[in-house]
Image (cartoon, grey):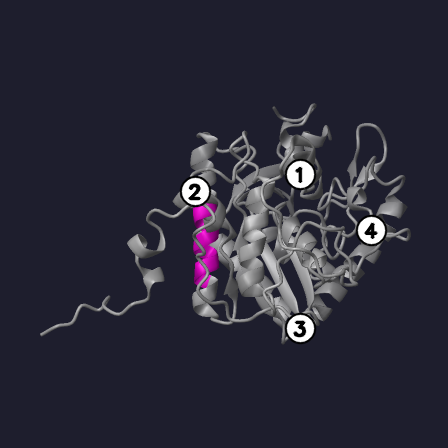
Amino acid sequence: MSTNPYRGRPDHCFWRQAMAGRDATGVDPVTALPFRITRADAVATAGSCFAQHLARHLSGAGFRHLVTERHPGGDAPDEGYGVFPARFGNIYTTLQLRQLFERAYGLLRPRTRAWALPDGGFADPCRPRIQAGGFPSLGALEEDRRRHLAAVRRMFETCDVFIFTLGLTEGWVSAEDGVAVPLHPGVLGIETPPDAWRFANAGFAATLGALEAFLAGLRDVNPTVRVMLTVSPVSLVATHEDRHVLVSTVASKSILRAVAEEMCRRDPGIAYFPSYEIITGPQARGHFFADDLREVTPEGVAHVMSVFARHGLEDGSAPAAGPAPGTEPAPAAAPPPAAPASAAEAADYAALTRVICDEDAIVAPGGAA
């Protein structure tokens, strides 16, 4: 007589026991991660805007968010210092990530070295908003890029843990050499030939292939690095596909989630942390989205971080929003706050959890919409 193969499975395997009737904070979808981050680990973060929350909360809980590129006067988030380990800005696609590695090690040299800004100055196409007003000269841009790529190499070679937040599949690449950029130059008012940059919406195979290539390179220069993947729950601010932005969002996030799943199946040592599921799952009932139905509320961020701390940090430390990330650990922070009690407290907490997003320029005054 055959036996029901589901008999004896733990409660988290069943919707009724694990999900039904629970509220937004009553579901913890993490069962086990292959490793925990220790206070001795140098942790590098990269990815979409949501990745900045991980960096900030790790630092606030006294863990080491690695920063290899610093402003002479200390962290300056508005200039891209301290937001991520090096001053590379948002990395939305796996192609951008792969090419960051290739540029850092001289394997890729983009033919377009600079964009001339309409008000003067020059922007680095691969990180066009990193310098307010642009660089004053091509020489200054090239010198900054040289220092920057050296800092990127230090990040890859010295991090103990690398956390990448997958954000988008849509992007723009040079028609000349295939170099990916986070924004079309037209968003910034930069004049280029109409056929110089082409829209690219990566499917599963291309997204997976770029991530695989990056991880192979990373392990060549840092064989012992531990890797964690997560998917941003923040929806597309706009789509260039001729369809509704909601359809494009679901398509993009589905591909990214499937890629993360495939990587973890191929390498069980890679950790997947379900930020996406915590925020967008039916148990949340939309509670963790702001009124625009896109941005994640401070309460949502705090809940994600509390689950991350419970399973991903060595002592279950609960991070709270804190100072800008740095190489030196900050004092241990209190657990994440509950919903702010007043409008003033809500505004203060929202300011602490603010993130810097290149993507927002698409719909900013003077942008595409």
Q: Which of the marked residues, 4 or 2, is nearer the chain's N terminus?
A: 4
Q: Nearer the viewer, residue 154 or 231?
A: 231
In this image, 224 relative to 205: left or right?
Answer: right
Q: Is residue 369 above or below residue 314?
A: above
Whether residue 342 is in magenta: the answer is no
Q: Which of the marked residues, 2 or 3, is nearer the chain's N terminus?
A: 3
Q: CA distance from mark 2 to mark 3?
A: 33 Å
Q: Residues within 10 Å of mark 3 (few under 14, many from 20)?
A: some
Q: CA distance from mark 4 to mark 1?
A: 20 Å
Magenta stretch, overall SS: helix
Q: Which residue is mark 1?
A: 350
Camera-near label (1 vs 2) is: 1
Local secondary structure at mark 4: loop
Q: Residues within 10 Å of mark 2 (few under 14, many from 20)?
A: some
Q: Which residue is mark 2?
A: 251
Place of residue 16 in the rendered image (x, y in percent of width and height, measured from the top left): 29, 53
Q: CA distance from mark 3 to mark 1?
A: 36 Å
